[in-house]
Structures are given as C-alpha cells and as structure tokens.
Amino acid sequence: MVSMRNIRMQSKSTESRGSQARPLPGYQDDILRSLRRIMRAVDLYSRRLITEYGLSGPQLLCLRQLDNPAGMLTGELARAMSLSPATVSGILDRLEAQEFLIRERQQDDKRRVRVRLTPRGRRMVRKAPPPLEHGFLEKLNALPVRRQAQIQDSLSSLVEMMSAGDLDAAPLLITAGVDSGRGPGRGRV
C-alpha cells in the first residue's frame, strides 16, 4: 500500500524534474484488486439470488419496478430500468413463464403493453432479499456531497477507461449474465 507521505515525496520529486507524472508503485494492483472485490461482491449476491430465489438480478429489479397496482407500460419499464426494450422483453418472457407477471395489450393501442405482477410475483418481491446497493446507498448518502462527487468522478473515469460508457446498466448492483448454469436459458438475464 502506498502511503500519503510517499505520494507527496514522489510528487515533489516529479515536479522538481519537470517530467510527466508516472503511476505510483502499487496503485495499479490496488485499483485492480478493489475492482475485483466489487465484482466479486456483486457476483456472490447474484448467485445467491439464483440459488435461493430462482431469479437473476435484472429479473428481481423488474419485479421491484412493477410492484404497484397499476403496473407499467413496457417502454416505461425499460426506461426505469435503464435497459433496452429488447433486453426487458427477454426478462419479461422469463418472468411470465414463471407466472410472476402478466402482460395486457391496451385496448386503445394494441402496440402498448401494460405489465402487472401476479399475486405470486408480489409474494416474491416481499420475500426476496433487499438490493445489494441498499447498505451501500445508506453509507454513500452519509458522505459529504463533495466526497460523493469525487467518487462519481472517479467511477466515470473508470467507465471511460474500460470503454464501457455505451453499455446498458440497470441502477442495481447485479450481474446481468449470471444464471443458474443449468439447462436452457443459461447466461440470460
């Protein structure tokens, strides 16, 4: 681990030489290790959902979004989940097959489909564990706004470095591609 004292010393040394700043020893490994820990925590949560509840993270997110008496139109649901309509359609297919929801075509416009939870779907929402990010958000919200902005800026930089800015991303800490690994549908959300 690199100490703040070492950072200041190297910074002064670099400034005095007038050269480009170089990465500090250990930063790359520490950053990669932190990213792996985050990915591992998300992966473990996702595997627990599949093993104990038979749901992927995106499926649980979808059920939670639909947990209101009126349900939602499929386009609204896709926007709320920050996923493409095609991705949401696949999620809905799997949830409908498990009888967690029903789809109803609107009488006034057959292109519009309203999705509602069934009683079974409501029971699943009630018994499923809280989202992984629940505890994280509590801690994040307790930080000063300036620190939150720093974290957001750093994460935006990571997204850019990883060329991941154009990827669909639900506002839930889940692994979209994790499935039970058994039978058809493996790897689907």
Image (cartoon, helix red, strand yellow):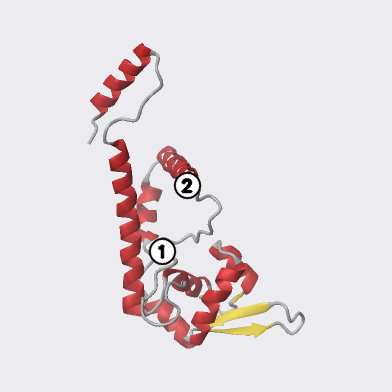
Q: What percent of the width, then of the height, locates residue 89?
A: 58, 75
- On residue 159, which mark appears? 2
Q: Residue at x 49, y 81 (%)?
A: 95
Left of 172 or right of it: where is 36? left
Q: Which residue is mark 1?
A: 174
Q: What percent of the width, then of the height, locates residue 105?
A: 68, 83
Left of 8 or right of it: where is 110? right
When asked about the image quadrant of residue 87, the answer is bottom right
Q: For the residue carrying disc 1, how many other residues have a C-alpha within 10 Å: few (<14), some (14-19), or many (20+)?
A: many
Q: What percent of the width, then of the height, locates residue 164?
A: 50, 51
Task: Tell me the kind of residue under disc 2.
Answer: Val
Quadrant where the N terminus is found in the figure: top left
Along the line of sight, the residue nearer the viewer: 115 or 94: 94
Left of 25 or right of it: where is 117? right
Q: Secondary structure at mark 2?
A: helix
- On residue 29, which mark appears? none
Q: For the residue carrying disc 2, how many other residues have a C-alpha within 10 Å: few (<14), some (14-19), or many (20+)?
A: some
Q: Considering only vertical position in the picture, is 160 above or below 181?
A: above
Specify whether residue 68 is in view. no
Specify whether residue 176 is in view. yes
Q: Secondary structure at mark 1?
A: loop
Q: CA distance from mark 2 to mark 1?
A: 16 Å
